[in-house]
Image (cartoon, rainbow, N blue to C red):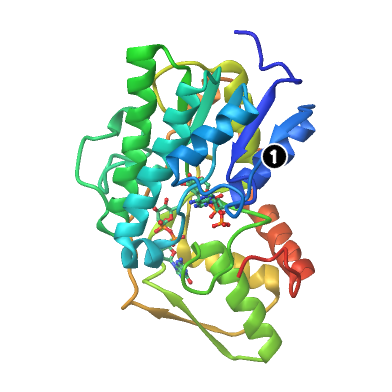
Amino acid sequence: MAPVPRDAKVYVAGHQGLVGGAIWRALQGAGFTNLVGRSREELDLTDEAAVDAFYARERPDYVYVAAAKVGGILANDTYPADFLLDNLRIQTAVITGAHRAGVRKLLFLGSSCIYPKHAPQPMTEDCLLTGPLEPTNEWYAVAKIAGIKTCQALRRQHGFDAIAVMPTNLYGPGDNFHPTNSHVLPALIRRFVEAKESGAKEVTCWGTGRVYREFLHVDDLAAACVHLMDVYSDAGIVNIGTGTDVTIRELTEMVQAAVGWEGRIVWDSSKPDGTPRKLLDVSKLTALGWKAQVPLERGVAETVAWYLKNQGSSELRL
Ligand SMILES: NC(=O)C1=CN([C@@H]2O[C@H](COP(=O)(O)OP(=O)(O)OC[C@H]3O[C@@H](n4cnc5c(N)ncnc54)[C@H](OP(=O)(O)O)[C@@H]3O)[C@@H](O)[C@H]2O)C=CC1
Ligand SMILES: C[C@H]1O[C@H](OP(=O)(O)OP(=O)(O)OC[C@H]2O[C@@H](n3cnc4c(=O)[nH]c(N)nc43)[C@H](O)[C@@H]2O)[C@@H](O)[C@@H](O)C1=O
């Protein structure tokens, strides 16, 4: 398969988010010169007519769908209607609009939470739809599964070249550091930095800390997406991860050490643990010629440094 021409026009939906921002940087790094992005203020992606008008005006050749309603375990559990409906609307408008506009190829971002709560570990792509979902994020997962099926149906019925990738938990510069709505890694960075600054002796983390998660640096994810756009065109979904995981307790200790706060961690078991484990099997991705590069400890240290550098600036999403 011929790689994507570096002068092709590429639209990154959600280019100001964690993933979209990283894909934008990766595309620039790979020599792409004709990138298009729109903020939410400029283009509300739940508005299908506005999305169609945007496509008609800009005529992109390639599209990355990195816009979505995204949040951590508590946000997912608290706003099920938003996580289901906003995501259905955004992805339907962006994917079907791309097909209508004659886009050559599209990459849709799903998530490892699409797999059953008790799937065998590590999880291969073919365990999709083989069992019940994790209840804290089933609404979001159902929307993401509908996104995968939208890509597969358009490919099957109309030959539209839409691929779908399933990243594990992500982190890195440009993340959302909201104290309650964010994912665990940015939440911990903010909490430990604030504890260090205030001289607090104790910090509370959620759940039991005994569950496992796999973390991938967002720059690795972006590199994998750009690679797959070049080399992969098929209906089958592709996992993107590192192939290794840690307990939340281990992660907490790693962030604590990176921040340099010495105090006591208390576990609030009234907060949900979520799925016990969701380690991705990455053999398909490895066979496609890609492997993660950023070790977790280094990625955490660099993200802490990024957070400290951007504290107080409008770059930081709180
Ligand atoms: N973060 C993670 O750990 C993981 C993420 N993913 C997937 O990666 C993708 C991107 O996630 P991530 O970058 O983390 O999320 P972010 O929240 O960082 O970015 C999402 C982007 O989408 C934009 N957006 C949301 N709603 C609309 C809308 N109605 N109109 C226009 N723009 C909109 C947001 O704009 P605004 O800033 O204005 O809200 C934001 O720029 C998602 O599909 C997610 O499922 C998959 C696995 C793990
Ligand atoms: C990417 C992924 O993200 C979500 O699923 P999740 O993996 O459960 O994500 P999380 O990062 O929020 O939590 C991971 C673990 O960490 C524990 N934890 C401790 N202390 C804090 C804390 O302070 N904040 C948060 N958020 N979690 C904490 C928390 O209790 C849990 O055990 C879904 O939205 C899902 O849809 C999805 O796609």
In the rendered image, residue 258, in percent from the top left (x then y), is placed at 69, 68
Is 124 drawn above or below residue 213 in the view shown?
above
Give whichever of 257, 44 is nearer the camera: 44
Residue 168 visible from this viewpoint: yes
Is 286 on the left or on the right of 35, as rendered?
left
Q: Is residue 129 left or right of residue 317?
A: left
Q: Residue at x 48, y 31 (%)?
A: 282
The kind of residue on which mark 1 rests is Trp
Task: Tell me which residue sits at (35%, 44%) in the image.
Answer: 88
Which residue corresponds to the image point at 61% horizontal and 73% vertical from the top-left? 190
Q: Quadrant of residue 270?
A: bottom left
On-image quarter of the C terminus: bottom right
Q: Which residue is situated farthest in the top direction here?
A: 1
| Nearer to us in this view, 178 or 243 | 178
Residue visible at 51% across and 38% down? 51
Whole-percent x and y of residue 46?
44, 47
**Residue behind mark 1:** 24
Viewer-nearest residue: 97 or 160:
97
Q: Relative to residue 247, is residue 92 depicted above or below? A: above
Q: Is residue 238 visible?
A: no
Apparent side of residue 76 relative to residue 42 in the rendered image (left or right): left
Q: Position of residue 293 (x, y in %)?
A: 67, 38
Q: Position of residue 223 (x, y in %)?
A: 66, 34
Mark 1: which secondary structure? helix
Relative placement, left or right, of 293 versus 112 is right
**Tag 1: Cα neighbours inside 10 Å, few (<14), some, or many (≥20)?**
many
